[in-house]
Every structure is written in structure tokens, then in C-alpha cells.
Image (cartoon, rainbow, N blue to C red):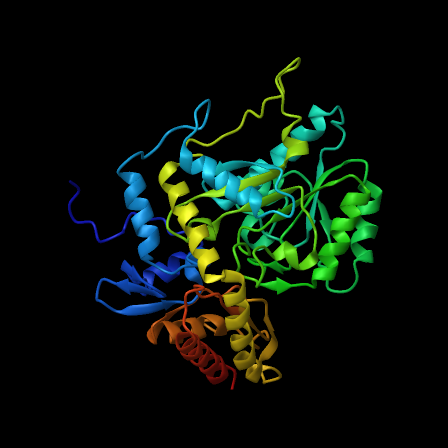
Amino acid sequence: MNKGLTPFSAVWHPYTRASAIAEGRTPVIVRGDGIYLIDDHGRRYVDAIASWWCAALGHSHPRLIAAIQQQASALQHSILANLTHPQAEELARRLAAMMPTPERHVLFASDGASAVEQALKIAAQYWHNIGRPERRRFACIHGAYHGDTFGAMAVGYLDQWHRPFKPWLAEAIQLPFPDTTSARWHKSLDPHRDELAAVIVEPLCLGAAGMRMYPAERLRALGDWCTANNTLLIVDEIAMGFGRTGRWFAFEHAGIDPDLVCVGKALTGGTLPMSATIAKNFIYETFTDRPVDRTLQHGHTFCGNPIAAAAANEALRVYEDMDAPARAAALGARMAERLDTLRGRSGIADVRCLGLIGVVELETESGAAAVPRPHRIRLRLQEQGILLRPLGNVLYLMPPLVISESELDALVQAFASAIASECG
């Protein structure tokens, strides 16, 4: 055993500046309970961003723990190549049934970027399968984020994160953010209709780009364009899916029927890593092996892991029992009413909400502060037992769906007060 190592000194923390680790303000989390994370000193923190948007059912949910324990005692893992198991079969049927048209097949993976990568490869090979290999380009919304693998970065490039990798990325067609009219999208897409494999979008809210929201009508217009121009539409529901926006999936607000849907994060209630790519059958049916082998040569070691699938199946039952979309809509309306008191105040550029997502965007601070204002607010709230992660000048709340009204009121009050104190 190595001697003299401090706790977690060998951990490379994702999306974390080295200076933040050096400051020594990194809580050591040892337990979770409902909406709270608990550190090694017994201090409780409200998980106000649902641990990167995935812990929609909070922490240590008894039904999820029971499902995991029961499955772990029977079958821990089995590959899905030339084999199957009941949990994966049930989960695939459940996910397909949640789509507007249930005739689908589901390819599992372990994280959101992998689900996106699968969708891109499926779309590209689909056109190859049907003899249209010239349709090989992708279009995406400028500023969107779809993950950190190379394919996902190509259609979700954020310069502040991905600049070192730009020379290695395929060039995607960039669509302007849809904050005016859908005609701008059509103008960008029309010249490329014959070479497009697919358009990929985050529905209604660009998460990592700063919770930038756009109207459902824009997404509906894009869906109509894809249908009219025989172009596949990939919808990335990894962050927005499973009730968060007030519908089971954000694309439902637009009344569209995507060809490929990527899900993850809240799929297992935040307990275990699992994601999925849900494809319409007309796509799946082109991946035949007779007379020519067009098998999708793609997969992940833990694709459809039985324990993760058991957790996901139980999470879907819990979401259904609690009517997650209705709960998110009701709690979100309550949160929006309270956050609206910040609108128009000095230092605040915008206040916006979608389901149980509440966003306050700050104006750019004049001068160069040693600690930027969003992080001063973050640290102030951390001292009060609330965990946030700003996105540039954007502060947001995305708490577990199991939060009570009183817990939500207290959280929003503390959030708004901290912002008001820093903004003067």
C-alpha cells in the first residue's frame, strides 16, 4: 500500500480548475439522502443541480436501492452480443413505448456522449446501407453541447472547452441559435439538403451552453424541414428527458417524432451509468447481413448491464407513479414565480425557466475580480449548504424532482438572496 497520500490526491477532477482544488474547498461526499449530499464531517448540502442533472430521484431512493440489490444477487453482467437478458428486454420495450411511435429498437451505452456517438454512426451507416453514401454531413445548433468524444464534440463544439481538439474534428454545419425565426435555420440547411445525414439538436434548452432556451415552435419547424427533406432528426434528450421540462421528453412540447432519440443521465435515477439510443425501425431494418453484411459493428462492454437496466426499469416505474412531468411542471411554476422577483434588477441580464429548471443570467462584471461574481455566489451558497455549478455568467437550479415544496421554497429563497446580495 502506498504511504503518505492525502485523501483523493490521485483523482483527476473533471471540469475542475487546478486552482479550485488547491484552495481546499472540495467537500468529501460520503453519503446521499434525498435531495442532500453529506460530507465526511456530517454536513448536509442541497444537491441543487441533481449531480449534473442525473439524480432526478435524489439520493438513496429505497426502491432503486432494492432493485439494484435484487438484480446484483442474481446476475451482475452479461454481454448483449448474441445473448440477451430480461432487464435489457424490458427496458428496451419501455423506452420504445415512450416514443410517439413505438416501433423502435434500442442500443444501450454507458454515458450520454456514447449515446450521441452511436446515433451519429447509425445515421451515417443508414445512408451507406441504402446506397446514399454522399449523405454524410451533420448539422447542429451553434453553441450546443453533446458530449466530449470526438464525434460528439464535432456537433457540439464549445471553444472554451474543446479548442485543443478542433484540428481533429469533422466540420459540421452550424445553425444559428433559434432566437428569432425558423427561417434562419432553413436558410442554413437548404443548400446542404442533399448531403445531410442528420440534424442533431438539444430540444428547447442548450444545457452546457448556459441553459439557453428557445420556443417549441422553432423545434417544430425544424422537424417539419427534416421530414420534407428526407433528413434524419436526432434529438439529444440526455439532460432534458424523463419529466424535467413538464413533459416526458422536451421534444413533446413541439409535437414532433424524431428518428433517433438519445437518453441518459436520469435514466437510472442517477444511480448507475447508463444511456441509450432509440432508433426508428425503418433505420434498424437496413442493418441486415444478407445478402450483404451491413451489421452495425459498434458496442460497449457494459452495454445493457443488468444491474443498471434494473435500476432504470425501477426508475421509470417511480417516474410514472409520481407523474414526473406534472410534478416538474407544478414545482417549476412555483420556482418561476419566486425567481421572477429578480427580473430587472441591477446586474441581472435575464431570468428564465423551463419545467423544473430555473436560470438567472448575470450581466458581465466590470473589471477583473480575483473570484468572478458567479463563483462568489457559488461559494456563498456552499457555505450555506447548497451546491451549485455556474455556467459562465449563468447560475441555475435543477434540483431532484423529489424535492418538496417547502424545500424548494427554502432553496429558491437562499439562491435569490445570494444573487441579490452580490448584484447590489
Indicate the quadrant where residue 345 lies: bottom right
- Residue 3, percent from left and from top: 15, 45
**With 360 as the anchor, is 61 left or right in this view?**
left
Please determine whether, in this image, residue 239 is positioned above or below residue 288: below
* Residue 350 horizontal side relative to residue 9, left or right: right
x 31%, y 51%: residue: 65
In the rendered image, the vertical position of residue 102 relative to residue 18, given as above or below = above
Q: Nearer the viewer, residue 274 or 2?
A: 274
Residue 413, visible in the rendered structure: yes
Residue sitting at 35 percent across and 51 percent down? Answer: 64
Relative vertical location of residue 361 with respect to residue 344 in this rendering, above or below: above
Residue 115 in the image: state x and y as whole percent: 53, 41
Q: Residue at x 46, y 32 (%)?
A: 300
Residue 393 seen in the current view: no
Up/down of 340 relative to 313, above or below: below
Q: Quadrant of residue 367?
A: bottom right
Q: Quadrant of residue 329?
A: bottom right
